[in-house]
Structures are given as C-alpha cells and as structure tokens.
Image (tube, coloured by chain):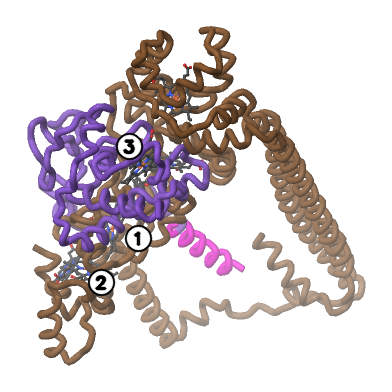
C-alpha cells in the first residue's frame, strides 16, 4: 500500500508528458460503477417480489370468516391459559373438538357447558371434567357465562382451522422461504458490491503500475533524465539537522511536552471504565426490552425508585413475561442471527435453566442456579452514590447518566463516573423544588443567601466532600 | 522514504495500543485496596451462603419492612374471600394515593394492561403476550380486593408483583385500577 502511494506521487511528477493516460482506468471505473448501480436495483427488485409473495400468502389465509372472529375471541379470552399447540396453564386446544369427540365421546354441547361454566360442570360430577381438572393440578378455568353458542362456535372453528397457523403453516413456509430468499439476496448484493469495489481497487492499482512503467520507458526513450537518479550527493537531512543546535533544542522541548501530555492523558484514564462492556452470562438485550418493547426501566430496576442501589432484577421478574414468551418472534430471531450472531431462543432457554422452569409441564422444578451478571458501573468504595436521590427526588432520567440504554444490544458504561463528572452536573443542574415540601423553607432561605431564583445542586451543598465521601 | 516508514510504524503502534484496548475487561486501578469494598455489596457473591448468593428470600416467619402479612390463600376460594376486602388506605388522602398509584401503574402494569386498562398495552399490541383482560370485563367482575389479591399472588400467566412493591404501594395501584375500571364502564 505504502509503496503504491509513493508510486502515485512519482506518476504525478512524470505525468506531464502523457496527460491522457488515465482515461482508460476512468472508463473502466465508470462501467463498473454503472454495473454496480444495476446490480443494486436488480437485488432491490428481488426483495420487492419476495415481499409481495409473502403478503399474498398471508392474505390468502384470512379469507375464512368465522375462524377470524374466533381468533380475536381466543386471543382476548383464552390465550392467557391456552395455546394451540403447546401446553400452558390449560391444555393445548388445536382440534380440541375432534380430539374430545374421538377420545372421550364428548360433543359440542359438552364444550358449551364447559366453557360457559367449567366449575359448575366439575361440581356436577361430570367424569371427564373432574379428570382434566385433577390432571391440571386443579387449576380453575375462568367461566365465560357471557359467551353465546355462536361465540364458542367461532372459537372452535379457529382451533380446528386457525387462520393464523393455517397461514403460517403455508405462509410460514412461504414467508420463511421469502425472507430467507430476500435476506440472501440482500447479503449477496452486499457481497457483490464489496467484491466489485475490491476489484476496481485492484484494477486501479494494476493500472497505476502499468502507467508508471510505460511512462518510465517513454521517458527513457525520449532521453528525459529521471530526477532522483540525477540529483547530486547532498548532505543528508538528519546530519544538517543535528548540526543546528537551536533546532535540536526546540525539538527536544516539544517532544518532552508532547510525551508529558500523552503520559498525563494515559494516567488520568487509569481507573476510568468508560466503555466497559463485559460479556454477560445471558445475552440480555436492552434494545429489545427497553427499546422495541418499551418496558419501563423501573419495571426491572425497581429499587432505583426507593433505594441506593438500582439493582438487577431477580429472575422471577423475568418470568412475569417469559412464562408466556417462550420464544421470540421470527423477525427478531432473524435479526439477532444476522446482526449480532446470537440465537435469542437459546438465550431464553438459558433463563429457563437458571430459574428452573420446566417448559414441558409448565411448572418450576425447584432447582435454580444464580445468574452471575457481571457488574459494570461500580464506584470505588470511598464514594457514595444514591439512586433514589437522583431518580425520585431530582427526577433525572436514567439516560442522562447511563446513555442511550434503549439502543444498547449489549450494556456498556456510558459515563466516565469520575468525580469531575459528578461535580459538573451538580454545578449545572437545578434542583426540582415543586411539589417537595422539604424544600419550601430551605429554598427561600438559600436563594436569598445566594441571590438567585433557582438553586443548583451545588448551592444546596452538592460539592461538600462529606456528601459523597464518608 | 525511510522516515515515512518509521512514522508509519509509530502510527501503527499507536493504533494498536488504542484499538486493541480490551473493552471486555475492566481498566487498571491505582489503589485497588481503597476501591474494593471490605463489606458485602448488594447482590454480591459470598462464600458462606447457599448458592454463594447474597440475594435471598427473607427467612420464614419474618416480616420485611413495609410489609403487612396477607391473610388469604392463593386459591380460587381464597380469592373469593378476598373479594370483599376494603382498602386500608385513608380515603382522605385518596388523591395523593391515586397519583402515586398511577405512576406505579404506568411502570408495572401498563406494558400489558394498557394505560387505560383496556387490555391493549404495548406487549399485547405487538402480540408478545395474549389474553390480557379489560378491567371492565363483566365476567371477571374485579373488585379492589381481587385486584390486590391478583397483584400479590399473580394469576395463571400473570406473575406476582409483590417483590417489586410494598403493601401500601400495592393498595395504591389497586385503587388506581378501580378508578380505571370506573372510567371504562362509564
């Protein structure tokens, strides 16, 4: 690379005689560029086609009327406890009607009765009702007395031929093919572009070498004397430099100052962990939770409201959602594999293993192991920082200190957490007085003392050593 | 030409030093013995406890601060008995309680139940969690007692929130839920 740079320089020097030699490479470059343009638009068309195919396939499934209504009812009322193909609190409901009539000889009437009032049916001594009730650890199914028979017919139609799973079964395959096709197309077109660029570059370099060679030959043929061969022996530059003592002194001073500057910079960053981004035992993504799904920070970091530490959520908090969310959506999974090389579903399995959740039987096994999260933000022991004072009293957003957490796939330390950082903010930030009776009196007195309308945290005593060091 | 390559080498080394600094491991410290705590830190790892885990459930038969023992069992019958409970909060401070309850509701419940309690939170709209009811659902006929019971124990696929709020806060949220139910049925 370095060699070729210098060759370019030399080319420039010798270029005068044959000025239009470059045009070949230019033409080549232009054609390649045009070709690239085409290849991009080609792959874009492919993407579009794949999308259309997918939407068509999805659209085709929706045509049946009743199952669609049934799906809405099912999602609203039953999905908390039932899934179609998976045991949850209650049994899997796909084809429940045929299953019950074949295995147990129960008809639709029984289902009406069961769904409208299952506790009543159990109490009435119906043998199968008692049996499933016992089988599911006597978990009670909510009665739905307000349902009409028609509603239940809709739901049963959905469980028999669910539009979404019929579509996904068909469209799922299609869409999978479509998306993988599309992404493959995307990947290829990216690679093509990169490859083509590399090719152009290699060509250019080759051209330059050739041009250089021909020029030299032409120069020789014309009898032009090349400069560097011709220049007479002069005093080497460094010797001339060493002889001039003033120059040496100035350089030494500059060198010393420069290295002192860098050494200072290096020593100041010792002990500062800005940008620290350890690998966590479970690949937990704030981008997905706090960004895409907009879960409040304090949902998980609930002690930030009321205490010094902000805390890492216990696993039961995760299970509030992950009892139901046992795998991520297909797009999410796809994105994770493509952009971060992580299989999100495996990460959720890690969570289940740690908390001891038996997915098959939907209950806890009682064997749990702690997840050893690696702590990132950590002040030295001699400094005291309290979250509730900043989050609840001062009303500061988490993001002001922790950065764009909702975009972080992997958590890192955003702020330096140095003393200067704390102090700066205390000097600049005004305290929140409204609605805080504690400040009524002290605020009026202090603002009189300092002669200002609004007090900063520093004027409240936020610079006193003892507040942070104890 | 020689000096060029020297400069190149120096820059290369500088690049290496800055770019190869490992962000997966913490930086050096000057005086670790003043930085590392001698006492136990919250959520730390210690040798003498089960699982080497400092965070543990409170011992049996003790009451955590801010907590009042709850007398109803986690069964359908217990829930029916809990139905007629009254809120222990002072009705004179209703407005403040509702304000606090509203904030807590936004943090802990709105993600599934929606800001208005209509069962249309962000997670439901994105089809991550299904089967979240409206508070005004007549078949459920929720009261402040069953709401508290549900927050305390959870219900089927809804988890318990007793680890994130204390007794008073759970009642404040329950009151706010009743207000939402009223607004929905209006």
Task: Determine whether the residue tagged by mark 3 lies in a helix, strand or loop.
Answer: loop
Q: Is residue A220 magenta?
A: no
* Tag nearer the camera, 1 or 2: 1
Report the magenta residues as a range. Answer: B1-18
Does B135 sit left or right of A83 as displayed? left
Q: Check if mark 1's residue and mark 2's residue have beta carbons within 8 Å.
A: no
Which dot marks residue B159?
A: 3
Q: Chain A hue?
A: brown
In the image shown, does A327 or B29 lie closer to the viewer? A327
In the image shown, does A322 or B85 lie closer to the viewer? B85
On screen, residue A217 above or below A427: above
Q: Mark 3 lies on which chain?
A: B
Other-residue count near label 2 (Cα within 10 Å), few / some / many at <14 / 14–19 / ≥20: few
Give how far across and how far down residue A458 sits, in percent: 19, 78
Q: Chain B hue?
A: purple
In this figure, which residue is indicated by the disc labeled 2?
A420
One can see residue A69 in this view: yes
């Amino acid at each position: 690379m370095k060699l070729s740079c210098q060759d370019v320089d030399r080319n420039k020097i010798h270029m005068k005689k044959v000025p239009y030699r470059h045009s070949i490479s230019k033409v080549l470059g232009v054609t390649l560029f045009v070709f690239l343009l085409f290849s991009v638009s080609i792959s874009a068309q492919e993407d579009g086609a794949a999308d259309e195919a997918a939407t068509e396939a999805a659209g085709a499934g929706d045509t049946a009327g009743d199952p669609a209504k049934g799906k809405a009812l099912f999602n609203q009322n039953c999905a908390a406890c039932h899934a179609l193909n998976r045991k949850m609190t209650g049994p899997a409901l796909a084809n429940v009607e045929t299953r019950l009539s074949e295995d147990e000889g129960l008809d639709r009437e029984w289902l009406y009765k069961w769904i409208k009032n299952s506790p009543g049916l159990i109490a009435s001594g119906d043998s199968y009702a008692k049996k499933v009730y016992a089988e599911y650890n006597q978990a009670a199914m909510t009665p739905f007395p307000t349902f009409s028979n028609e509603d239940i017919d809709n739901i049963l139609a959905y469980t028999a031929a669910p539009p979404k799973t019929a579509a996904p079964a068909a469209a799922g395959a299609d869409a999978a093919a479509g998306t993988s096709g599309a992404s493959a197309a995307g990947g290829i077109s990216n690679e093509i572009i990169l490859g083509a660029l590399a090719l152009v570059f290699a060509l250019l370099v080759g051209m330059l070498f050739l041009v250089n060679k021909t020029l030299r030959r032409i120069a020789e043929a014309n009898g032009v004397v090349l400069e560097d061969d011709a220049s007479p022996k002069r005093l080497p530059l460094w010797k001339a430099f060493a002889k001039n003592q003033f120059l040496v002194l100035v350089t030494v001073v500059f060198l010393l100052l420069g290295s002192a500057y860098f050494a200072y910079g290096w020593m100041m960053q010792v002990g500062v962990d800005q940008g620290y981004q350890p690998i966590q035992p479970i690949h937990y993504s704030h981008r997905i939770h706090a960004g895409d799904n907009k879960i409040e920070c304090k949902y998980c970091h609930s002690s930030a409201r009321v205490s010094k530490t902000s805390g890492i959520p216990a696993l039961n908090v995760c299970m509030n959602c992950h009892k139901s969310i046992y795998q991520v959506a297909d797009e999410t999974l796809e994105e994770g594999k493509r952009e971060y090389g992580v299989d999100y579903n495996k990460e959720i399995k890690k969570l289940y293993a740690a908390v001891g959740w038996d997915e098959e039987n939907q209950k806890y096994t009682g064997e749990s192991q702690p997840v050893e999260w690696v702590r990132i933000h950590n002040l030295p022991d001699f400094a005291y920082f309290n979250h509730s004072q900043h989050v609840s009293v001062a009303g500061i957003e988490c993001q002001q200190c922790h950065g764009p957490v909702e975009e972080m796939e992997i958590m890192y330390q955003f702020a330096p957490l140095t003393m200067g950082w704390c102090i700066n903010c205390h000097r600049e930030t005004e305290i929140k007085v409204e609605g805080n009776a504690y400040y009524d009196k002290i605020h009026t007195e202090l603002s009189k003392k300092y002669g200002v309308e609004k007090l900063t945290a520093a004027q409240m005593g936020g610079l006193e050593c003892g507040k942070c060091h104890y | 030409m020689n000096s060029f390559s020297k400069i190149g080498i120096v820059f290369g080394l500088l690049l290496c030093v800055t770019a190869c600094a490992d962000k997966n491991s913490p930086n050096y410290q000057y005086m670790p013995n003043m930085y590392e705590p001698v006492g136990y830190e919250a959520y730390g790892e210690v040798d003498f406890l089960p699982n080497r885990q400092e965070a543990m459930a409170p011992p049996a038969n003790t009451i955590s601060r801010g907590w009042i023992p709850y007398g109803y069992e986690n069964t359908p019958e217990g829930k029916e008995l809990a139905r007629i409970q009254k809120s222990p909060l002072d009705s004179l401070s209703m407005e403040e309680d509702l304000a606090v309850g509203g904030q807590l509701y936004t943090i802990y419940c709105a993600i599934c139940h929606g800001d208005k309690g209509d069962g249309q939170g962000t997670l439901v709209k994105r089809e991550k969690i299904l089967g979240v009811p409206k508070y005004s659902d007549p078949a459920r006929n929720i009261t402040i007692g069953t709401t508290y019971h549900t927050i305390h124990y959870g219900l089927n696929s809804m988890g318990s929130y007793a680890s994130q709020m204390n007794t008073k806060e759970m009642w404040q949220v329950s009151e706010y839920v009743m207000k939402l139910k009223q607004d929905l049925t209006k």
